[in-house]
Every structure is written in C-alpha cells, then in structure tokens.
C-alpha cells in the first residue's frame, strides 16, 4: 500500500508539466484512500533518495515538487533544442530585481531607482513570462499598478520562497569629507577604492519576507 | 575646472590625430558611422549607470565622489551622445542639471558651521547611486541563478491518454496579436527576415485561390472562375492582386494557349 | 564512462517532449565522445531494466524511445487534468499569428520569421484544432506544404475575415495589455474581439483593464 502511494505520486509527478503541491498530490486519491500529509511527505522523501544517484532529481520549488534534470547534464540536454535560451537584457533584469526585492512596487518606484523610464515592453515581457503580475493599485493620484513577482517566477528560478533570493547588498553609511572635492581636484593620486562591502549583506527582514509570502499565496 | 592630465578617461583623448593635430569633434560628414562608440554608449542603462561607470573608471569611492570631476566627464559624454545624434533620454539632461547644481553648491564658500548644519549636496546623489548599484548587482545575481530551460530542464514522462479528453485551451485574440508583436520586434533586428506587407485581404485571398486549385480535381482552372460578380469591384481587385502575387511568388502559373483564348491558372507543374 | 552515457541518455529522454531515436541520442555527444549504436542500445537496455519496477517505463515507439507512465496509473494521473486546462505555448501562438498574417506560408518561412525551428507538434496541434490547414505545396525542392488559416479560425476569434485583424503596419503601435494569466479569460463563448480599426490605433479593451483590477488583493 505504501509502495502504491509512492508509485502513484511518482507517476503523477512525471506526467505533470508543473510542480505539484502536497495538497494536489493528496487530491489524486479518492476519499477513503486519501493519504495524510505525512504519508505524502514520506513518499516524497523516499523518492528523493531513490533518485539521488540518477540523472534527475526531485526538487521542491514554490508551488510544489517536480522532477528535473540535474544541472550537470544541461550541456547535453540543451543540444536537444535548437533554440538557444533567451538572454535577458540588463534593463529587464534590473526591473525584475527591483520588483523581486521591493515588491509590491509601482512603475514610478522602479523608475526612481533605475533613473530611467521603464519601457512598456519590459513590463509586458515580465508579465507575459508570468514572472510579474499586478496585485493591486496604490492609492495615490493615478492609482498606479503595484507589481509583484509570482509563484511561477520562483518556480522558474528554482526557489521555494523569496527568502531564497541572494541577499541584497547593504547600503553603506555616507561619510563625506567636505574637502574631498578640493583634494581630488589638486590631483590626488591615491583614490580610495572601497566598494560596497561584500561580506555585510542583508537578509530580507523577517517581516518583509512574511509580507511577501502572503501576497504570493493569494489565489489568482 | 581643468582636468588633470595624468588621469584622463579614454573619451577625453582626441578621437583622431590628423597631421599631428588632435581632433576632438566628429566631423558631421563622417562617412563611416562610429558604430562602436555608439554601441558603447548605448550599453548604459541610464544616467546612474553612466555615473557609476565614470566613478569606477576613476577609481573613486562611490561614498565620496568628486562632483567636479564627475560632472565634467558626464557632460562630455552627453555632448558626445548629442554629437552622434543619439536619441538622448531626458533623464540624462535632468541628471546633468542636478550635477551642475551640486557642483555650484560645492563651489560656494561656506563656514564650518554651515557645513555641519547643511547636508552635503552630494548626499542625495550618492544615496541614489548606492541604491541603484545594489539592484544592479541583484540583477546580476538573478541572471546567474539557475533557471529553467537554461540550467534546469523538467523531467517528464509521456502519459498516454485514451480515456478522457484533455480540455482544449482557450486563446484570446490579444494573446495571438501580442505573440506576433514579439515576432515582429525580433524580426526587426534581422534585416534578412523581410515580412511582406500585402493587405491581409490579399493574403487571405491568396490562400483561397490556392485552396481552390488544390481542392479541384482538374489541374487547370479557367481564370474567370476565380471571380464572382457578387463580390463587386473590390472583390475582383483583391482576387486579381492575389493571383498576381501568387504568380510572382512562383506558386501558380498563368497560361494562355494563344492570344484571345481562355486564360488558365494552374499550380506550378510538378 | 558507460554510466555517464547512460545518465546523459536518461536525462535527455526525460527532458525531451518527443521520442528520441538512437541517432538523435548519439547526436547529443560531440564527435570524439559519440558512442556507437550498440553502446546506446546497451544503455537503453539497462535503463529499461532499471525502470521495470517503477511507475514509468522506457518504451520504443515508431520514432524512438520515450519514458511513459505505466497505464495502470492512468486513473490517478487523469485526475491531474480534471480541473486544469492546458495552455498553448508562446511558440504556438507565434506560429499561428505568422500563418494568419503571412499566409500561404511554408514551415520554412515561418521558421525564417521566428528565427527558430517550428516543432512538428505545433503544426499538428494547430491542424488538429482546425485553425490551420494545408492548402497546397510550394513548387520548390522538397515541395513544402503551404499553410493557411481556416474558417474555424475566423469563427473562433470572432472575425469576419482576416481583414478584421489589425493591419501589419499598425500592429506595433497597438497597446495590447497582456492578461496576467492567459488562462484567466472570459470563457470560451466570448473571445475578446478587439476589432482595431486602421484609424483607431490605441484602444486597450475595457475587459482587460477589468481583468487586472479583479486580481487586486488587500495588502497585509
């Protein structure tokens, strides 16, 4: 019986093109046969072990579990497709990054950070890819749309939640020397080169990630 | 505001030396477009990005920039963009104005107390630069993250359906048009993909003419059979254009035994 | 080494949407690493054994090998589709649009415009849906089929004729608002008829903006 539950889950995960959540996996079974959450989790655990030595793996992303090819085989597998993977422009990636870390964000807020207008095309592409969606409107004049990332975005990038994103670099304290301009003007040949400290990085605050997760689970 | 000679950015170097004389300006009638330079300038994602580049290039600390120097270089860059007749986003000009304002404030003599009370005019700019830089990095990080269809591929198995029909997806016309816009945008980048611009009614009629030829058991169809009087003048014109276009594309032949005799339309011989 | 060949073959079979022939499997490897037919066959044999006890199996079809779910699990797997309608890919929509605007068109012409190969699946799906049909063959080497849209295509999209589609010249200027989710649409009885006139360029449909507002969520 346990083997059957595991086999049915395995079969379904392979048949599905999208990740399946534990609830979805439970719903494959009819009333009396429905396994509880823990049995599904156990079965998933067994599957994970069974495939650990194979070329594919069972991974968990934001919307559930899916089988995927281990990335060490991507070189060969990519040859199956003549189509090269899309390269996204820096403008698009920057816009996406701002939405991912600052969500919910309006277009104006994105433009403030980037210092340039955000093209309609970029917003369209992001929405078409279903990485970004409008989750409401800000109650300010013009009621601009508020953008947030989607579960599909997390799925696409193999993330379980936004907290798995690489941490955003810290803002450093600004400590200006009033005379520095004059010194530099005189031909100071020892310019300091301090970049934003790589080690001191900021995890998204607890509060923040909670907020975001609630937005994420909102039904479509 | 003379720039220090030992600390010159590449742009400040003369563009060319002619008879030993440096040329700073691109002549208007320059035949070869300075593509390389243009591409270089276009890689900036806006004024903040350009400023960060200038700062890095000067080994300056973002937290303590020399506004005087940066302003000069920045203005040189946007002048160059204008000389190249690049479409200069308004944001670049706004930034130039902002820099000029900060510079003028920096030049005003102030007492020590004033300096302590007032915020350094550079502070706001530096905040913005820092803020932009962290998202620029975040964008790089996101780009490096493993993603589907580049680093990861779904592992699926075929499921042979025989019992139930999978429901057919619904499609909105907008979605189809949107897809086509994307195609057009992509195609614009490759000049080899010329997309015909015949009116749709003609292309539709081309399909119908071909279908008629194809569905008909006879290999030839008389020219007049493609025209129906009910369609009126417009219809006749569209059909005529469609037949000519098909002929031009080598999809059909128009033949006539002798002058004054019946004109026939046939698919190109096999 | 043999294990690696087997693993690469396994990964590729799982990643591919279509059966892979032995030749196609060989072509995943670069020249010096290319295994001969027998080694590929051996690897396939080993895989067949490995999966014999699992819920999926490696089968050979007319066009090659593929993994498929064992039929005894179809009762459960079928439940995956009970609610979720599938969705057409971007590639399919692009292909459909190109045929609509450039008909009669060969597959090669479609590929030229898209810049990438058009899969056989897409052409098959479009023809099964009866939106596209072959109306003849181009008299060039290979006699490629010429595709055109059908009456059913016009009916489905509520068009009188193709001339109701926005003209190519204006298409780039039309501001199409993508729905946040293509599935989230208005029901099969009323595909949005955007009906753009030549003189009236910008007019996002009422319905769309409504769609987006419906997705509103209250912030935490």
Image: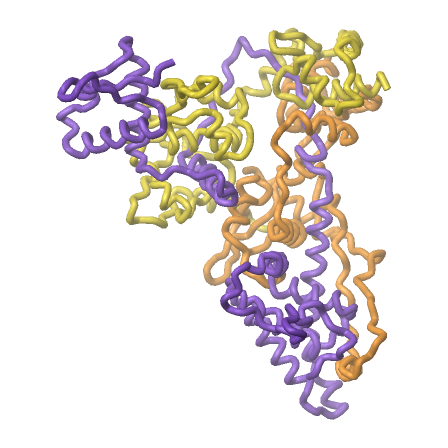
Chain colours: A orange, B purple, C yellow
Can residue A116 be seen in the rendering of this structure? Answer: yes
Looking at the rendering, which quadrant does residue B19 occupy?
A: bottom right
Residue C24 placed where, x, y %?
67, 17
User: Could you say where residue A77 lies in the image, as x and y percent from the top left?
Assistant: 71, 26
Task: Check the image and report above or below for A11 versus B184.
Answer: above
Image coordinates for residue B65, horizontal then vertical, percent? 74, 74
Residue drawn at x 69%, y 37% is B147
Q: Residue at x 66, y 21 (%)?
A: B156
In the rendered view, would you say C146 is above or below B46?
Answer: above
Q: Where is residue A70 shown, x and y percent of the image? A: 77, 28
Residue at horizontal 69 percent and vertical 68 percent from the top: B127
**Above-or-below relation of A143 to B79:** above
Looking at this view, is A211 or B166 the one in front?
A: B166
Quarter of the rendering containing residue B245: top left
Query: Left of B209 or right of it: where is A208?
Result: right
The residue located at (64%, 68%) in the rendering is B15
């Amino acid at each position: 019986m346990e083997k059957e539950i595991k086999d049915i889950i395995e079969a379904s995960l392979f048949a599905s093109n999208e990740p399946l959540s534990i609830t979805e996996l439970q719903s494959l079974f009819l009333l009396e046969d429905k396994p509880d959450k823990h049995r599904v989790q156990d079965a998933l655990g067994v599957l994970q072990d069974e495939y650990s030595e194979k070329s594919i793996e069972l991974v968990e992303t934001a919307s559930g579990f899916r089988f995927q090819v281990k990335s060490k085989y991507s070189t060969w597998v990519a040859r199956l497709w003549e189509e090269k993977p899309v390269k996204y422009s820096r403008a698009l990636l920057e816009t996406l990054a701002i939405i991912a870390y600052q969500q919910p964000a309006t277009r104006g807020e994105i433009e403030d950070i980037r210092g340039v207008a955000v093209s309609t095309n970029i917003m369209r592409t992001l929405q078409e890819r279903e990485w970004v969606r409008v989750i409401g409107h800000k109650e300010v004049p013009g009621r601009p749309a508020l953008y947030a990332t989607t579960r599909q975005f997390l799925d696409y990038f193999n993330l379980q939640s936004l907290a798995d994103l690489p941490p955003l670099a810290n803002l450093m304290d600004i400590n200006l020397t009033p005379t520095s301009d004059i010194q530099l003007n005189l031909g100071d040949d020892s310019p300091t080169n301090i970049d934003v400290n790589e080690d001191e990085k900021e995890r998204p605050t607890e509060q923040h990630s909670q907020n975001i997760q609630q937005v994420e689970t909102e039904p479509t | 505001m003379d720039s220090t000679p030992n600390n010159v950015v590449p742009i400040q170097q003369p563009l060319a030396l002619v008879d030993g004389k440096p040329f700073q300006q691109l002549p208007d009638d320059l035949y070869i477009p300075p593509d390389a330079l243009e591409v270089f300038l276009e890689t900036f994602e806006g004024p903040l990005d350009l400023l960060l580049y200038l700062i890095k290039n000067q080994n300056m600390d973002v937290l303590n920039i020399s506004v005087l120097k940066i302003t000069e270089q920045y203005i040189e860059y946007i002048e160059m963009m204008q000389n190249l007749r690049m479409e200069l986003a308004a944001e670049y000009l706004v930034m130039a104005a902002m820099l000029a304002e900060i510079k003028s404030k920096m030049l005003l003599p102030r007492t020590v107390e004033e300096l302590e009370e007032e915020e350094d005019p550079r502070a706001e700019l530096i905040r913005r630069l820092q803020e932009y830089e962290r998202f620029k990095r975040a964008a790089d990080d996101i780009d490096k993250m493993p993603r589907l269809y580049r680093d990861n591929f779904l592992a699926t198995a075929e499921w042979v359906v025989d019992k139930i029909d999978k429901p057919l997806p619904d499609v909105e016309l907008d979605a189809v048009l949107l897809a086509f816009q994307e195609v057009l945008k992509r195609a614009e980048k490759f000049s080899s993909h010329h997309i015909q611009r015949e009116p749709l009614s003609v292309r539709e009629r081309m399909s119908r003419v071909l279908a008629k030829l194809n569905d008909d058991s006879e290999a030839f169809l008389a020219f007049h059979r493609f025209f129906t009087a009910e369609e009126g003048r417009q219809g006749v014109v569209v059909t005529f254009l469609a037949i000519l276009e098909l002929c031009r594309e080598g999809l059909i032949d128009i033949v006539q035994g002798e002058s004054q005799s019946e004109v026939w339309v046939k698919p190109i011989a096999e």
